[in-house]
C-alpha cells in the first residue's frame, strides 16, 4: 500500500477515536475534555492574567541570579503571595551554595552578587584622562555586567579582537593589561584572553540566539556569563551591537580608546533558595502522591517572559484553585498539588537529589518556562511532549486542553462569542494557536524526565522570542490573555491528574488513542532514507511506545480487562495501517560486536550537563570529552546534546547498546551504534553506568 493510501486510512479512522466534529455553534462541539463544564467555567471566570501580570511586574524589578540578594527578594515576594493565597507548607528551602557540595550531577555554584559596576570612556585633556561617556552601569542596567564577574579597577586601552575565541584573533595584537572587545560570550574567551594573553578585562557585544529577527534591534544588550568554576577570574561588560559597532569603527581608523572599568562584585559562599508550597490532597491513600507545578525564578532583570511569566502563571494557578476550593466551586483533589519556584535546572537537580522524597512523591509535572509573550515577541506557544524514553499518557492530557483552548479562542476571535473565551480584560483577543509538539530540551523538565527520576512533564513554552536573554524582555511585552490561557491549560491538566480516578479512564483512553493515530500520521509523513528492515524496526519501536503510553494510565487509575482487550484491538488496527509488523529482537539489523547491557549505578542522578557545570567533563576530562563523537553528532531531527541525553535515559539494565542506538535513530535520525557505545563506555568509566551483561 502506498504512503498516501495509508494516510487516507488513518484520516478515515481518526473520527472513531476523536470527539465528533460539528459546526462551531454546536453545544456538543464545545463540550470540554476530561473536566465538567462547571469546572471549566469556574477556572475561566477566576483565572486572571492581569493579577498574574501584577505579580510579574514585582518579580521583574529584581536581577535574579542564583544565590543573589535579588533572587532572595524575588523568592520572598513569591513566598508572601503564596501565603496570602492560603497555600499550605509555604516555605523557602535552602541548600549550601559553596562551590563544593555535589547534588547528583550538579556541583553547587557559589552565590554571586554585585554592588557596583561602571564602564566609562575617557577623553584626554592635556596630560590627563578624564571620564567623558558612561558606557555601562550596573545600577541602570544590571544585564550590562556579566554574571560571575569579579571586582576590578582598571584604566586601559580597548583592543578589538573580533570573535575572540581562537588564537589567530590575537595575532599581532598586544592585549596584555588591556580591555578586549569581543563578539563572543565572555565565558568563551576568558581563558584565551585573560589566561593566555593577560588581558585585564572583557567588553562583549555577544548577540542573542539566532532567529529571523536576530540583529534587527541593535540596541539590545544580551545577558553575559563568565565561567563559574576554574581560574582566569575577571570581569566583563556587555554592550549593544550599536555601541560596539561605533567602537569598532573608531578602532579600525586607528583611534585610541581608553576606558575606566570599576567593578565591585564576586562569588561568595551562600545558599541556593527554592520556594515551595502545596494544596494538600483529600484522599488519605493518595495525598502523598503529588502533581507538581514547576518553573524557574532566576534570570536577569527584567526577564519578563523568561521566566517571570512561568513563575506568575503557576502562582495564579495556585491562587485560583485554592480560592475555588475554599468557595466550594472545586472539590479538593485526591492528590496533592505542589508548586515549586527554583533556580533553573540546577535548582531542580539540587532539590530532587537533596530531598529525594520530592522525587518519590511527584507523579507528573506541569512545567512553564516562557508562557506570556505578546505579539511583539514573535513567539509561538508550544505544549510539548516528553522524550521517547519516557512514554506517558500525561502529555496527551496537556495536549487535549491545549487543543481545547485553541478551538475556543479561535471561535471567539472569529465570531466574538464562545462559551469559554479565555480572554483577560486587559489582554489580547487573538487566537492562541498553540502547537502540540514533540520533545525539546532546555529547561527544568529535562531534570524531571531524566532517566534517574522518570517523572513525565507537560512543558509549555514560547519559542522563539526575539527578546529572550536581553534587556528587551520587559513586562510591557507580556499579554495578560496569554498568561491566563497558559494558566488554564496548566490548571486544568494538573487538577485533572490530581483527581483522576477509574471512572475517568474511558475518556482518557479515548484521548490517548486519538493522539496515537495522529502520531502515526506524523510518522508516515516523514520521508527518511531508510532501508526496509530499518523502517520495520522503527515502526515496531513506535508500537512499543504506544503500548507503553497506554499502560502508563494504570499509574493513575486501574485498567480493567475489557479496556485492555479493546485497546489491543485498536493497536492491531493501527499496526496494520503502518504495515510494520512487530519484531522480537530487531530481526534484520546488523548487530556489531558491542552487544553489552548497561545499568545506572545511582551515583549520579540528573543530566550530565547543567548550568555552569558539566559532570562528564569534570570527571572524564575536557580533552577526552571533546573527542566523544556523539556530543557533536548531527542527526535528522536532533543534535549531539539530545542524542547524549536520551542515550543515557534509555539505559535500563535491559536494553543492549545496539537497541539503544536503534531507539535514538527512531527518535532523532540514524546514528552509528559505535558512536553510542563510545559515549556509554565513557559514562561507565566514570561510574555513572555499570555493565550488567
Image (spheres, grey):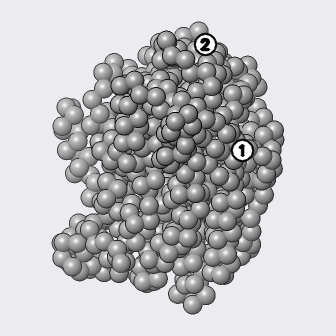
Please tell me whether mark 2 sits on a helix, a strand or a loop: loop
Residue occupied by mark 1: 266
Q: Say which residue appears at 54% left-offset and 10% top-offset.
A: 592
Residue 234 image position (x, y, % from top left): 66, 34
- Determine the residue positioned at 81% across, 38% down: 100
Q: Which mark is residue 329?
A: none
Q: Nearer the viewer, residue 466 or 515?
A: 466
Percent across and percent down for residue 374 are 35, 62
Image-based side of 636 in relation to 692, left or right: left
Q: Secondary structure at mark 1?
A: strand
Q: CA distance from mark 2 to mark 1?
A: 48 Å
Q: Quadrant of residue 224?
A: top right
- Give the mark nearest the N terminus, 2 or 1: 1
Which residue position is annotated with label 2?
594
Does 679 sit above or below residue 184? above
Indicate the quadrant containing the N terminus: top left, top right, bottom left or bottom right: top left
Q: So how many labels did they put on this image?
A: 2
Disc 2 crowd, CA 10 A, few/some/many (<14, 14-19, 20+): few
Amino acid at each position: 500500500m502506498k504512503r498516501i493510501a495509508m494516510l487516507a486510512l488513518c484520516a478515515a479512522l481518526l473520527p472513531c477515536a476523536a470527539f465528533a466534529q460539528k459546526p462551531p455553534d454546536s453545544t456538543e462541539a464545545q463540550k470540554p475534555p476530561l473536566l465538567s463544564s462547571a469546572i471549566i467555567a469556574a477556572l475561566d471566570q477566576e483565572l486572571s492574567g492581569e493579577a498574574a501580570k501584577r505579580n510579574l511586574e514585582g518579580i521583574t524589578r529584581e536581577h535574579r541570579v542564583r544565590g543573589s540578594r535579588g533572587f532572595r527578594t524575588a523568592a520572598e515576594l513569591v513566598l508572601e503571595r503564596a501565603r496570602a493565597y492560603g497555600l499550605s507548607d509555604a516555605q523557602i528551602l535552602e541548600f549550601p551554595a559553596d562551590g563544593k557540595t555535589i547534588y547528583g550531577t550538579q556541583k553547587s555554584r557559589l552565590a554571586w552578587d554585585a554592588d557596583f559596576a561602571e564602564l566609562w570612556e575617557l577623553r584626554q585633556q592635556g596630560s590627563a584622562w578624564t571620564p567623558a561617556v558612561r558606557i555601562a552601569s550596573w545600577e541602570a542596567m544590571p544585564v550590562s555586567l556579566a554574571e560571575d564577574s569579579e571586582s576590578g579597577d582598571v584604566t586601559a586601552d580597548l583592543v578589538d579582537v573580533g570573535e575572540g575565541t581562537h588564537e589567530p584573533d590575537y595575532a599581532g595584537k598586544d592585549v596584555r593589561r588591556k580591555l578586549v572587545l569581543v563578539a563572543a560570550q565572555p565565558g568563551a574567551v576568558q581563558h584565551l584572553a585573560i589566561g593566555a594573553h593577560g588581558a585585564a578585562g572583557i567588553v562583549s557585544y555577544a548577540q542573542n540566539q539566532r532567529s529571523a529577527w536576530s540583529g534587527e534591534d541593535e540596541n539590545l544588550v544580551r545577558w553575559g556569563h563568565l565561567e563559574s568554576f576554574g581560574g582566569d577570574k575577571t570581569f566583563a561588560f556587555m554592550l549593544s551591537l550599536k555601541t560596539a559597532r561605533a567602537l569598532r569603527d573608531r578602532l579600525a581608523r586607528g583611534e585610541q580608546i581608553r576606558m575606566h572599568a570599576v567593578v565591585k562584585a564576586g562569588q561568595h559562599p551562600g545558599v541556593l533558595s527554592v520556594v515551595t508550597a502545596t494544596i494538600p490532597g483529600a484522599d488519605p491513600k493518595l495525598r502523598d502522591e503529588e502533581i507538581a507545578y514547576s518553573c524557574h525564578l532566576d534570570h536577569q532583570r527584567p526577564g519578563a517572559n523568561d521566566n517571570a511569566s512561568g513563575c506568575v502563571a503557576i502562582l495564579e494557578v495556585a491562587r485560583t484553585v485554592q480560592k475555588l476550593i475554599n468557595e466550594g466551586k472545586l472539590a479538593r483533589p485526591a492528590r496533592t498539588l505542589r508548586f515549586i519556584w527554583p533556580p533553573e535546572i540546577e535548582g531542580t537537580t539540587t532539590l530532587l537529589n537533596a530531598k529525594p522524597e520530592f522525587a518519590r512523591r511527584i507523579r507528573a509535572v506541569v512545567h512553564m518556562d516562557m508562557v506570556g509573550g505578546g505579539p511583539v515577541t514573535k513567539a509561538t506557544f508550544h505544549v510539548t511532549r516528553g522524550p521517547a524514553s519516557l512514554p506517558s499518557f500525561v502529555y496527551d492530557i496537556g495536549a487535549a486542553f491545549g487543543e481545547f483552548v485553541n478551538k475556543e479562542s479561535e471561535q471567539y476571535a472569529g465570531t466574538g462569542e464562545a462559551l469559554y473565551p479565555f480572554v483577560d480584560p486587559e489582554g489580547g483577543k487573538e487566537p492562541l494557536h498553540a502547537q502540540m509538539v514533540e520533545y525539546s530540551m532546555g529547561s527544568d523538565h529535562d531534570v524531571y524526565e531524566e532517566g534517574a527520576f522518570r517523572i513525565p512533564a507537560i512543558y509549555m513554552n514560547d519559542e522563539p522570542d526575539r527578546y529572550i536573554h536581553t534587556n528587551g524582555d520587559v513586562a510591557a511585552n507580556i499579554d495578560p490573555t496569554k498568561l491566563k490561557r497558559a494558566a488554564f491549560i496548566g490548571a486544568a491538566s494538573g487538577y485533572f491528574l490530581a483527581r483522576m480516578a477509574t471512572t475517568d479512564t474511558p475518556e482518557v483512553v479515548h484521548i490517548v488513542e486519538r493522539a496515537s493515530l495522529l502520531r502515526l500520521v506524523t510518522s508516515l509523513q516523514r520521508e527518511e532514507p531508510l532501508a526496509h528492515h530499518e523502517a520495520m524496526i522503527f515502526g515496531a519501536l513506535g508500537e512499543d511506545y504506544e503500548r507503553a503510553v497506554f499502560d502508563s494510565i494504570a499509574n493513575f487509575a486501574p485498567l480493567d480487562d475489557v479496556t485492555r482487550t479493546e485497546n489491543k484491538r485498536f493497536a492491531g488496527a493501527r499496526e496494520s495501517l503502518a504495515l510494520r509488523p512487530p519484531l522480537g529482537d530487531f530481526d534484520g539489523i546488523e548487530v556489531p560486536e558491542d552487544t553489552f547491557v548497561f545499568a545506572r549505578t545511582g551515583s549520579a542522578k540528573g543530566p550530565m550537563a547543567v548550568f555552569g557545570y558539566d559532570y562528564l567533563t569534570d570527571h572524564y576530562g575536557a580533552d577526552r570529552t571533546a573527542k566523544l563523537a556523539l556530543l557533536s553528532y548531527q542527526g535528522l531531527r536532533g543534535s549531539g546534546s539530545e542524542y547524549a541525553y536520551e542515550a543515557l535515559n534509555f539505559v535500563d539494565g535491559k536494553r543492549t547498546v545496539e537497541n539503544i542506538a536503534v531507539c535514538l535513530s527512531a527518535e532523532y535520525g540514524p546514528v552509528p551504534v559505535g558512536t553510542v557505545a563510545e559515549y556509554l563506555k565513557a559514562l561507565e568509566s566514570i561510574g555513572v553506568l555499570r555493565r550488567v551483561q
